[in-house]
Image (cartoon, rainbow, N blue to C red):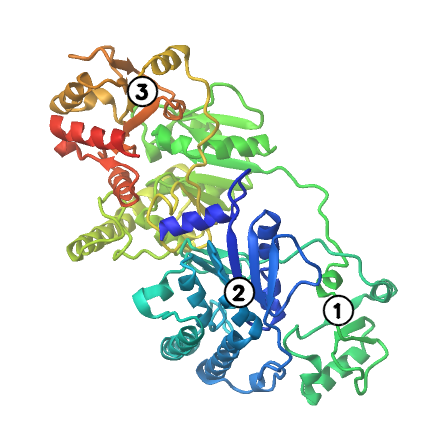
Amino acid sequence: MLLKIVYVLLVLSVICGGKTHNILVVVSHPGISHFKAFENLFVGLATKGHNVTVISHFPRDKPIPNYKDVSIREDRTYSGLQTIKSSLSFDFLGINDQALLMQYGIQSCESMKHKNFQKFLKEKNHFDLVILNEFSTLCYRGLAKKYKAPYIEHPAYMPRLASPYSDRMTFFQRVDNFLSLALFYLYYRYKYESSGNEYSKKYLGVDLLEDNFLYNMSLLFTNSHFSINFPRPLVPNIIELSGMHIRKPKQLPKHLEQYISESTHGVIYFSLGSTLKGHSLPPEKRDVFLTVFRDMPERVIWKWENDTMEGKPENVLLQKWTPQFDIIFSVILAFDSCNASKILVVVSHPGVSHFKAFENLFVGLAKKGHNVTVISHFPQQTPIPNYRDVSIREEGAYSCKSMKHENFQKFLKEDSHFDLVILNEFSTLCYRGLARKYKAPYIGLAPTSLFVWHALHTGSPEHPGYMPKMGTPYTDKMTFLQRVENSLLMAVVYLKYKFLYHPNGNEFSRKYLGVDILEDNFLYSMSLLFTNMHYSLHFPRPLVPNIIETAGLHIGEPKMLPKHLQQYISESPHGVIYFSLGSTLKGHTLPKEKRDAFIEVFKDMPERIIWKWENDTMDGKPDNVLLQKWTPQFDIICHPGVKAFIFQGGMLSLPIYADQSTNAASLIAKAGGVVLQLDDVNVESVREALTEVLSSK
């Protein structure tokens, strides 16, 4: 799945001089809104040089380079599309919706009979990617299997969005919603799938139900957005693209421009869309609108497909077709300027990796003109405009205990105001009181993958059956006993957090800030959570919209290495291996027998070694090993002369604590490296691991 997603992203990416691809698009539904929602995607791919074949009811009026139309347009009427009477009646458990969707699906699949589609099938085509409109039309998925290509789907709507409920349902609404979803599932499982497969086998010669093919989708583009629809957790291969169809408004036709401009009290626009027809509105409902419009000072533009309307008021203009988008945006709202904000950042953990993971965010906000105050153990060496440091650096001052620091106490006494608070989320609930003190929204920063409490405070699903607890060596493919252990570990962490971390953090907050963070469910009011993870490196999981993966935010352009390191690497004919235990663990703390195993292996290797080692000397150091108390790690790794690096999460991973075991397990699952457990370190295991890393292509 990962490789398919990466492949699809490469197809869609813009790479100078990159290979163009043959892409097949199928939008079999005759509703124009289904086509228009993603038309810019199809045209954009063709504009970027890809060869795009589009099977739809909406061929282009003017040809576009690299864009080929296969029209399946027919004049016949799709039953159910021209009337809205059935939707006015009570729909028990959404049965009417399900029956109508089933009808739409069958009628869409019927377009496989179209002579143009049959002619297309007889051509000897090859496609690298298939993009399908998903609207009760499983039959066309067979094209992906026929052409042996990954496929993306783009639904215009999602099942049961026709219900009138919000995400704040009553008990009986939840019961109704549950039963209707269950019924919809059964409909889909035993009606849609078999019906779609019947058409696929008949016209494409492909069985969709073999080998779990229906669950092989690479990506799903959905015409929704959490800011408009109700937020819900989504897996990484579902991408919300609402608004893709929006463009710059064009000049209105002269008669419409004049009609709107000359209206003293403005204009009301009324349309039932492209599928439903205005004249199909029942007379008694239509007359209600006419009565209301007649008494209004505003003019009305009514999309009405007939030539006449009985009882039409003088202030109503009938139009068979309207440039809807341009009408709606005939008044443009423009913001001439934006204000700089005052932002407070707190990174109370003394580990430099916690700070470095998001430092570019803090500095970037300051460069954009915001006033950023950063409370941390790592003040900038060179002052940055709009960036103020409040240093809490102190030996032994760890997280909440750093609230005692004189600089923090001095800061609290200032008469400050902040528009936003950004907090490092690593067992430091105490600092959340600052958001309440300054009455500001707050953003959390997770410097690792998600802890149990991150999911708890954001409402994101946490399923121990396939989400390994951070710190375990498990992947998303756990055995039964591993799932049991994972579940118990998560339960223990949750209980510790609830009954130990909560009261402990609140105690510090009340003592130093005078704020109770356990009142009014304040802990669950986090606006956003930035997490230093990514589904391509960690294991994919559903996330609510306010959790944003930011792995790689710390990466910048590699800098020139110090002269002695540049020379050391460049002059090595066999390349260099870089070895570090990170910023928190010190190299000299490695047990002697483990260190000697590495020394013994390094001694016999032709490569040179750069070893991050905080002491001045090392007993038995080979001649090909260079000791360095500090290294510009990122710049070293980026040097082409570096053949491998040994790190907690490197090509040869040596996980020791915290999230390192989980990261190492992820590397193995993605075939991105070799993992060596500290207990297993000996001369043979180190030599074998390095040989595998250096010989891998």
Image x and y of residue 518, in percent: 38, 51
The tally of labels here is: 3
Which residue is drawn at the image coordinates 81% and 80% (left, top)?
Answer: 294
* Front-most of residues 299 and 248: 248
Q: Which residue is mark 3?
A: 575
State yes or no: discs 3 and 1 in contact (Cβ < 8 Å). Answer: no
Report crowding for label 2: few under 14, some 14 to 19, many 20 or more residues within 10 A (C-alpha).
Answer: many
Label 2: state its secondary structure: strand
State yes or no: discs 2 and 3 in contact (Cβ < 8 Å). Answer: no
Label 1: state its secondary structure: loop
Image x and y of residue 271, in percent: 70, 73
Kind of residue indicated by mark 3: Gly
Could you tell which of marks 3 and 1 lies nearer the N-terminus?
A: 1
- Corner quadrant of residue 260: bottom right
Label 3: state its secondary structure: loop
Q: Is residue 461 left or right of residue 468?
A: right
Task: Please say whether residue 303 is visible from this viewpoint.
Answer: yes
Image x and y of residue 84, in percent: 61, 83
Residue 675 vs 26, above or below: the answer is above
- Circle number at residue 348: none
Task: Please say whether residue 244 is visible from this viewpoint.
Answer: no
Q: Is residue 10 left or right of residue 675?
A: right
* Front-most of residues 423 and 529: 529
- Circle number at residue 322: 1
* Front-most of residues 25 and 81: 25
> Mark 2, mark 1: which one is toward the viewer?
2
Could you tell which of marks 2 and 1 lies nearer the N-terminus?
A: 2
Could you tell which of marks 2 and 3 lies nearer the N-terminus?
A: 2
Q: Which residue is mark 2?
A: 26
Image x and y of residue 73, in percent: 62, 73
